[in-house]
Image (cartoon, rainbow, N blue to C red):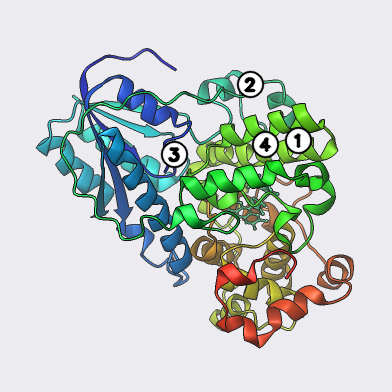
Amino acid sequence: MERQSKNLRTLYWLDQDLRLDDNPALEYAAAGASELLCVYCHDASRQAVDSFGTPRQGRMRQRFIAQSLAQLSRDLRPLGQSLLQVSGAPVMNLQRLLGEHRIQRVVRSRHFGVLENRQWEWLRRDNPAVDFVEIDGYTLFTQEQIMRIGDLPETFSKFRRQTERIPVISTVERGRLPPPVIAVDANSPEAGIAAAAAVQFVGGEDAAAAHLDSYFDGRSPSSYKQTRNELDGWPNSSKMSPWLATGCLSVRRLYQRLKQYEASHGANDSTYWLYFELLWREYFQWYARQHAKKLFMPGGITGDNPDYDFDAGRFERWCRGETRWPLVNACMQQLNLTGYLSNRARQIVASALVNELGLDWRCGAGYFEQQLLDYDVASNWGNWQYIAGVGADPRGGRHFSIEKQARQFDADGRFVAKWLDPGRKDVSYEAVLATGD
Ligand SMILES: Cc1cc2nc3c(=O)[nH]c(=O)nc-3n(C[C@H](O)[C@H](O)[C@H](O)COP(=O)(O)OP(=O)(O)OC[C@H]3O[C@@H](n4cnc5c(N)ncnc54)[C@H](O)[C@@H]3O)c2cc1C
């Protein structure tokens, strides 16, 4: 961590780092602060609709974030701190807080979103007397480590070969927090919910920690490579993504647990493969940073300007799971009911939207943005580009045969029967995601 000045009135701007554990941005902010103001902005633009008419943040993710914030707010109180939540335009809100409280320094965890980086730059430009510091807390590596490998490789395979030798940054100890700049009356109705969740998607650091324990206390990591492609089933993949995406779980903490698991149960192809997937996540973060607004361009990083079709009816039928492919429909039902889809299912429905329905990949990415609990700007748009053939895929896109996928991954039709069962629509998402149900 870089050297820093001391005793500054500091504002810590939280977003995808909703935790106390292994939070280097918080530790950095606290270590150099005379007083600290922790702020989360409910960005109004995330409630807006995208250019295809899809609201950007759906109800399930809102709830997950609210649960995560409630826990954080509750956990800060015994440490003498509090969380100020503001709604509207982040830049205007922060601008006001900087002036009102004579803030000398703003700290945040490095962000990989284009809009979020623009907001950061605007604030920085308008407040030249304030120190702005970004700390790498969302990724395995720091920006400095990544820059040392030179230009970001254009394919994942090259990136993997170059980064596999880099040491992952150690987790940080939690230090004392300085007093608050202002006392915030944190009245959080969701407080207490998170602690109850051991194995389902409930927001907050407690649920993340409980899930981390339960995954690594079992033996699923040792067979991850064989099971990760399954369409369904709780232990078949780690299910860490919603907590990673909100920052309720630190990716370095996860990595540390994986290493501990390997030390006690032995390393094998599967434990390596879990790390391999974390490197995919890592790649997409730095890819988003590098390509910035190209992440959202029709031609992606290719620079082409393809003229896509957009048919509102076809798109809506895909969203609702009313296409002519039962497998696609079952996947979309699962997404709509739970906010989660396996990687395999994401690939199938994305390929169907692009290759079978001939729609603009960006409308599918926008719909995922709305629905996914684990929505992450870099992983979502980067993966969609990959499938649509306008991203980092050296093979120029992926076209999955739906019939073949159905034969291979749902030969007995159980997945389709489960998710197309009309009774499912009345069941809560916690219930329907249960293991092997
Ligand atoms: C079209 C499409 C959109 C996607 N959108 C997102 C998204 O918004 N947010 C998101 O976290 N993942 C996204 N993914 C990647 C992947 O599908 C999910 O991370 C994974 O299914 C989450 O389940 P898990 O935690 O059990 O994953 P595991 O298989 O257990 O993997 C462990 C972790 O590695 C990371 N990871 C795994 N696969 C990928 C991948 N292909 N790309 C990036 N990171 C990966 C995730 O953080 C995941 O939690 C997308 C994939 C596709 C094909």
Which-is-in-front pick, marks 2 and 4? 4
| Mark 3 and mark 2: Cα distance apart in space | 20 Å
| Mark 1 and mark 3: Cα distance apart in space | 24 Å
Q: Is residue 303 visible?
A: no
Amino acid at circle 3: His
> Is residue 398 shown left or right of residue 196?
right
Where, quadrant-wise, is the N terminus in this rendering? top left
Residue 436 percent across, percent down from the top left: 75, 66
The label on residue 279 is 4
Q: Secondary structure at mark 1?
A: helix
Residue bearing the label numbered 1: 157
> Is disc 3's CB within 8 Å of ligand 1?
no
Which-is-in-front pick, marks 3 and 2? 3
Residue at (71, 24) in percent of width and height: 162
Amino acid at circle 1: Ser
Residue bearing the label numbered 2: 149
